[in-house]
Image (cartoon, helix red, strand yellow):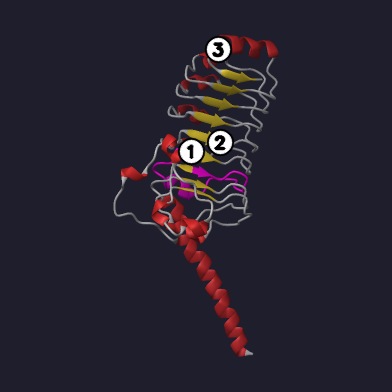
Amino acid sequence: MKRILYLIIGLTLFVFLFYTTGCRKRLKYDSFDSTKLFTLSELYEIKTFRSLDEALKQPDSVYKLIIFGKELNRVPEEVYSFKYLNTLELSKNNMNTLPEYIGDMIYLQGLYLAENKFSDIPEQVYRLPNLKRIRMGENKFDFIPEKLLKMKSIEEIYFGRNQIWEMPDILFDMLQLRVLKLDNNNISNLKTSISKLKNLEVLNLKNNKVESIPFEELLSLEKLRILNLKGNKIPFKVLDSLRKAMPNTKIDY
């Protein structure tokens, strides 16, 4: 009987150590190799791995990894092996945490965590020096974390299908921002400070509660090429006038 008890205790301890040490693993790099940091157009041409078994055959050549719709509660341990990841797609799972080593991935530019169970951004994300694109759509956010908005590297933010009710003032200090997608939230006010985002190319506020828009401020966004305002409460006449005044912008309403 004691032997069985000891065996159970031993197995329990093993499982505990497996999970906790796995979460605490840290990555170390001898140096930074700029040739392994790819532009967005280059990434489109690079092979995407969707199988961990296949990826593990050549871990140092894995730059894009997709683990989509697997109903996972945690990041697979094998991801630790891919230290040159530029893009990590973990959408449509059941995660609300990330392992520590994710924050060490100095080449990571795109982190996609849509359709999970996050209500805040894990602290590890704020350590990523080259993170440009983050997708947190369809999670459990009612605000955009301020620490994320202070990251100077971020160029694309995707927080659609949450419960966000406000675009915080600090958001408009992100002068490098190119894409902002906040569709299907509870935002009621589009502030005049939007004019500060001179590099903005895409703004999606579809299915919110916006009733009026800062007309002149939107006109000042010369790089804006896509504007989606469908499903809001903005008068048709205003939107029609905006479309005529911005012929180079695709405006959906």
Q: Gap in Å between the C-alphas at discs 3 and 1?
A: 28 Å
Which residue is identified by label 1?
Answer: 133
Residue kind at label 1, given as amino acid type: Arg
Task: Report x, y in % for residue 151.
Answer: 43, 38
Q: In front of the other: label 3 or label 1?
A: 3
Q: Which of marks 3 and 1 is nearer the N terminus?
A: 1
Mark 3 highlights which residue? 247
Mark 1 and mark 2 lie on one chain; the one further toward the N terminus is 1
Label pair 1/2, CB-CB below 8 angstroms: yes
Amino acid type for the residue under numbered disc 3: Pro
The residue nearer to you, when weighing 250 against 59, is 59
The segment highlighted magenta reads 111-132
Q: In which quarter of the image is the N terminus?
A: bottom right
For residue 112, above or below residue 54: above
x, y percentage for residue 245?
A: 56, 9
For label 2, the crowd category at 10 Å Cα-Cα, with few meaning under 14, some 14 to 19 and many 20 or more, is many
- The majority secondary structure of the magenta stretch comes to loop
